[in-house]
Amino acid sequence: MADPLAALQNARAAEQIAQGHPSSARYRTALATSLWLEAEALTRLSRLPEARLAVTRATDLAEADRSLDKLDGDLALARGRIAETGGNVALALKSYQQAHAIFAHLGLRRSQSLALVGLGLIFDQAHDYSTAIRYYREAAQVYSADPALAISGANNLGFALLQMGRYEDALRDFRRALKTAADLKSDLLQAQILTNIAGAETHLHRLGEADRAANAALRLLGKRDEVGQTTIIWGVKAEVDYQRGALASAAADLAKAFRGVNLTTTIAPFRDMHEIAYKVYRAQGNLPLALTHLEAFKRLDDQGRSLAASANLSLMSAKFDFARQQLEIEHLKSEQLQRDISLRKSRAATQSLVFAAIVLSAILFLAWIAWRHSMLESHRKAITAKNVELTKTLAQRDGEIERRTVIESQLRLAMETAQQASRAKSHFLANMSHELRTPLNAIIGFSELMVSGKFKAEKLQEYASSILEGGQHLLSILNDILDMARIEAGRVALDEGPVCLGDIVDYSLSVLGCDRHMDGKRVTVAGRDHGIVVHADELRLRQVLINLVSNALKFTGEDGRIEVRIEPMSDGVDLVVADNGKGIPAEKLDIIMEPFGQAESTYTRSHGGVGLGLPIVKSLAELHGGRLTITSEISKGTVARVHLPADRVMNNNHIGSWPAAALTTTSAA
């Protein structure tokens, strides 16, 4: 961690020593250990192909002795780090879990803690920061005596809090990691942590503290920077200078950060640097360079969403495999239980004899107890009288203690309620800032380029399309927020009249473009009858169906299948939207029905949105005297059902007489 290049040199020197003693009994273990350390150092230097080769050779040597020891767990841990750095989330998760199982079996608590940190990094990559933080804290509880491990845990915890917008909490963990890194006298680790501190201070607009931290990181690195940390530091300094209004200084910082970098092939750490570069060059009037950085930012932002979605799918697959293994274990336990029952039956006769002897002994023992009881009774009466007096005294004291306990419980409940409200506010603000920033950047950036006229004519359609897409996204978000505010304030009044449900379906699918190419997704309409007419607000029913179908389209894959149905019921009529998407966990169904509630835990979700669609549908259904119900099964899909009561149906003769087969089907090619 402190000096990976020096570690690589030492590991290769160790490999040469081991190669010189092929006849030694320790030859295989020594050679495998040196190769493992080579792989660890190469991973931290981002030389992944060499790291994979080293860990493969080491694994072959370690498995030859057919015994389980610490080296087997260390190699699993190394495979997990390589897979995680290379983006193979499923292999990384499997390797970290394997390492944790080995270390737990061997009772190696420090190594268990390392495996838990690795698992936390996987959930970090999936943008599930709450789960990542839980793993980091569990790692610190398992083992806290290693300073290097303490640095890693505190720094990772701070980064996760930073991504959640909890900047002050992140700074506390970064400073704790910095103190330990200073004790280890590692310039590289101190520089990396100071860079994170500078980024957090910038988010809090404490520009002086941010600049001091960034300059301290540059001084520590000097001219030695094997891992490219100075590039990130100059990017942070550019953000500071931009916020100060020093555009020339910010541009100079960016020139240092992107020196020798191909802007069309940059990787994820450059995403925020491209965003600030776009802002700086746009403010300077250098629109061609601003456009280049804007396009790079959009590319990395799209890649980040895709990676988060891939990581979530890999985690879901791994959890399914784990559940299947647990089921097999339960089957084995059941078979063992059957064998135990047979064994118990064979012992029944012997136990009967033993039981008879025990009963006889118990009778004799009870007789002795009765004799002792008669002797103790007289003493007990005297003690009882004293106890009555003592009880009265204690009752007075207990009453006072109970009153204090009630007050403390009320204070605790009030504190928890306030903390929950604060977390909800922080989540909403972080969510909204993330959802609004990207489309606003695209709208402003491409609009300025079109106004300036400094672009290629063939790019006009592409830029105009990006502006339209961003504007429609913003309008959708703002409309949902305004609708939810009016609903919660009780200012929504229904404009009711006769409404044909068949027309509602036709209009909604037309608005969503379900008659055009939709990336292989297919929308069908079943059980359709133009004769069903209800007394309702036509505009609001359209809004309900559009929201439900939009959700279904959003959460199904390229081969997604969505079915829209109108189903008469004995007590009314239902509008139904069913899909074969990834499904919603049972514990999340209540959350998604609340305003701003979503099944994913952070604002950097792979599908975007502020979580108001379903709450609006639920509220509009209730305004009509109906209800919204959602049923879902993981990996099989979701069914959303809006029920309108019988008194809303104007042609009651259709209720209960619906034909069984689907009447009409439409699809998106």
Image (spheres, rainbow, N blue to C red):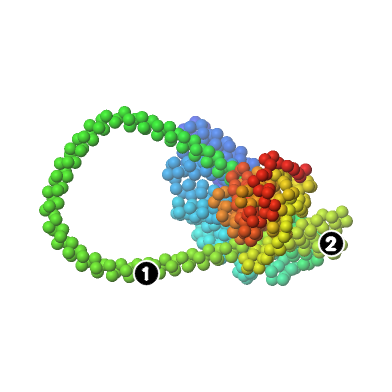
Which amino acid does the dot numbered 1 rest on? Arg
Which amino acid does the dot numbered 2 rest on? Met
Q: Which mark is residue 590?
A: none
Q: Which mark is residue 450?
A: 2
Q: Which mark is residue 404?
A: 1
Please report the residue visible at 72 percent of the width from the left and 46 percent of the height from the top.
528
**Side (left or right) of 142 relative to 587:** left
Quarter of the C terminus within the rendering: top right
Q: Secondary structure at mark 2?
A: helix
**Disc 1 vs disc 2: Cβ atoms closer than 8 Å?**
no
> What percent of the width, then of the height, locates residue 7?
56, 48
The residue closer to the viewer here, 287 or 443, is 443
Q: Secondary structure at mark 1?
A: helix
Say few, some or many: other residues with alpha carbon within 10 Å of mark 1 (under 14 / 14 to 19 / 20 or more). Answer: few
Find residue 276 and report its image quarter: bottom right
Q: CA distance from mark 1 to mark 2?
A: 69 Å
> What percent of the width, then of the height, locates residue 475?
73, 62
Q: Look at the picture and state if 224 lies above or below 487.
A: above
The residue closer to the viewer here, 392 or 28, is 392
Q: Look at the picture and state if 178 lies above or below 206.
A: above
The residue closer to the viewer here, 641 or 121, is 641
Residue furthest out toward the right: 457
> What percent of the width, then of the height, locates residue 57?
57, 36
Camera-side mark, 1 or 2: 1
Find residue 130 and report its image quarter: bottom right
Residue furthest out toward the front: 653
**Side (left or right) of 376 relative to 281:** left
Asked if one can make out residue 534 in the rendered structure from this viewpoint, the answer is yes
**Side (left or right) of 99 relative to 51:** left
